[in-house]
Amino acid sequence: MAPDPSCEVLLAMWEQAYGLSPAARGMALLGLVLPQRPVDELRAMSLGQRDAALLDLRAKLFGHQLQSVAPCPACGDKVELEFLVDDVRIAETGTSTPVRVALGRRNLIARAATCDDVLFIEQLPSSASRRSVLLERCVQTTGKQRMTTRLTFTADEERLLASQLAECDPQADMRIGLECFACAHAWQARFDIVRFLWQEIDVWAQRLLAEVHLLASAYGWSERSIVTMSPWRRQIYLEMLRR
């Protein structure tokens, strides 16, 4: 694991990744955790391996406690939730080791989806096409049945294969059990660490730049001198300006 990224490194990553797609942002965040790894190795990691690394990064940057709000799908009321990083961590993360799946007469092998897979499919125009192409990339026939023609699946088969892929890599499909206090509806909400962590970094970066603006305007300091200042020292100067 790499040392904690500095404010400068984190701010530079935020700026470079601001206009990127979710999967590309996930890669940018992963690069903070494993800066010495070649890009090809990062792209070959399973989504569960990526998400486990990003949970470690989140704990380093903002601590182990997480807070969020989710809308109830039944009544729309907001449900507040609070949990720890370890509450959404799976001991075993997915690998590229395939598992066997039987669909009628077809014997298939399925592997966990990788970062490279999601980078490829998110360019596609619809959720149906993304699901279909992901299965095409992650599922193959075995033995004498192995073919170069494109595999096709019914809707029920797609659901079965999706569940198999989730079992291959449970960290990539982390769910949190929730219950609405207003209507008592219970449901499972997916926890997306890429989206969650990016939103936290975005809030942090916007706040930091606002502090840079105030301190630079008041004292004439450079952005770099303010950003590299300890948060505690920077806060003292901000408090002085508010008096």
Image: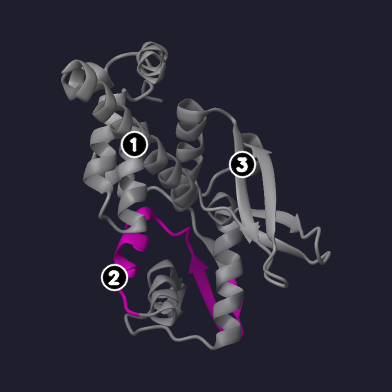
The residue closer to the viewer here, 117 or 18, is 18
Query: In the figure, 170 relative to 30: above or below?
Result: below
The residue closer to the viewer here, 229 or 93, is 229
Labels 1 and 3: the sequence-earlier one: 3
Q: In which quadrant of the rendered image does the C terminus lie? A: top left
Query: SS at mark 3?
Result: strand
Where is residue 187 shown, x and y percent of the image?
73, 64
Q: Is residue 97 visible?
A: yes
Q: In which quadrant of the rendered image does the N terminus lie? A: top left
The residue singled out by tag 1 in the image is 205
Where is residue 100 shown, x and y percent of the image?
56, 66
Where is residue 192 shown, x and y percent of the image?
52, 53
Q: Magenta residues, as a range? A: 101-125
**For the residues bearing labels 1 and 3, Cβ distance under 8 angstroms:** no
The residue closer to the viewer here, 205 or 127, is 205
The residue singled out by tag 2 in the image is 123
The residue singled out by tag 3 in the image is 67
Please report the residue visible at 43 percent of the width from the left and 46 percent of the height from the top. Answer: 199
Three-letter code, disc 2: Gln
Query: In the figure, 77 relative to 197: above or below?
Result: below
Where is residue 47 shown, x and y percent of the image?
45, 52
**For the residues bearing labels 1 and 2, Cβ distance under 8 angstroms:** no
Looking at the image, the residue that sits furthest to the front is: 243
